[in-house]
């Protein structure tokens, strides 16, 4: 299995929180999340609350003394993880494939936490049968980092 590319993205989570509190939230979410595999999960989270947080609530949403994670934090984590993974995927592609890249066409799949089974898929991608995109995400405080290794499935 040959490595064809590697992409890395680091994201400050406050950037996503600001978008979640803005009038552009729906547009951003629909641009990033796959309509069948990711968007329903986010929409289900969104239905758990009817209150729209104010900008100050968004900025102060993390309570360091609490072990519970707020709905806003979970939504932010989902979007941050997805965005970082897909941005890293974009960086792993060659220039030609970057021209046709669309965030919402790709989705993350993870089976049993095994690294080799955490892949990004897009059935429309012309090389999907010959390549695999293995992803990893890490969170550290206010940052999310995504890494994607693009490999050839069958070396010749």
Image (tube, rainbow, N blue to C red):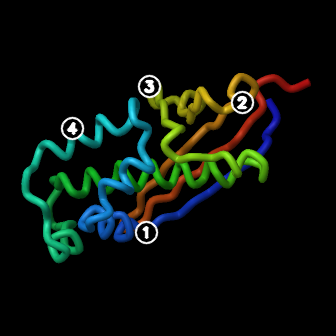
Residue 9, x across and y down, in percent: 57, 60
Give the number of the mark in front: 4 or 1. 4
Residue 59 vs residue 115, the one in the foreground: 59
Marks 2 and 4: in contact by CB < 8 Å? no
Marks 1 and 4: in contact by CB < 8 Å? no
List the residue tagged with mark 3.
Answer: 112
Marks 2 and 1: in contact by CB < 8 Å? no
Residue 119, x across and y down, in percent: 57, 33
Q: Report whether 97 appears left or right of 145.
A: right
Give the number of the mark in front: 1 or 2. 2
List the residue tagged with mark 4.
Answer: 44
Task: Give the CA distance from mark 3 to mark 4.
Answer: 23 Å
Residue at 74 percent across and 30 percent down: it is 127
Residue 30, x across and y down, in percent: 38, 47
Precedes in sequence: disc 1 or disc 2? 1
Residue 81, x across and y down, in percent: 43, 51
Give the number of the mark in front: 4 or 2. 2
Number of residues whose C-alpha sits closer than 10 Å to that of mark 3, classed few (under 14), some (14–19) or many (20 or more): few
Q: Report whether 154 appears left or right of 122.
A: right
Q: Report whether 126 appears left or right of 46.
A: right
List the residue tagged with mark 1.
Answer: 12
């Amino acid at each position: 299995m040959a490595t064809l590319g590697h992409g890395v993205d680091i994201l400050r989570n406050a950037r996503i929180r600001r978008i979640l509190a803005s009038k552009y939230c729906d547009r951003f979410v629909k641009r990033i999340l796959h309509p069948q595999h990711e968007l329903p999960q986010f929409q289900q989270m969104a239905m758990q609350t009817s209150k729209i947080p104010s900008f100050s609530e968004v900025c102060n949403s993390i309570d360091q003394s609490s072990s519970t994670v707020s709905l806003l934090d979970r939504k932010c984590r989902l979007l941050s993880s997805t965005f970082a993974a897909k941005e890293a995927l974009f960086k792993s592609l060659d220039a030609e494939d970057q021209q046709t890249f669309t965030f919402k066409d790709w989705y993350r799949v993870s089976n049993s936490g095994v690294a080799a089974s955490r892949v990004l898929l897009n059935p429309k991608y012309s090389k999907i049968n010959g390549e695999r995109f293995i992803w990893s995400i890490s969170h550290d405080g206010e940052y999310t980092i995504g890494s994607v290794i693009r490999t050839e499935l069958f070396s010749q």
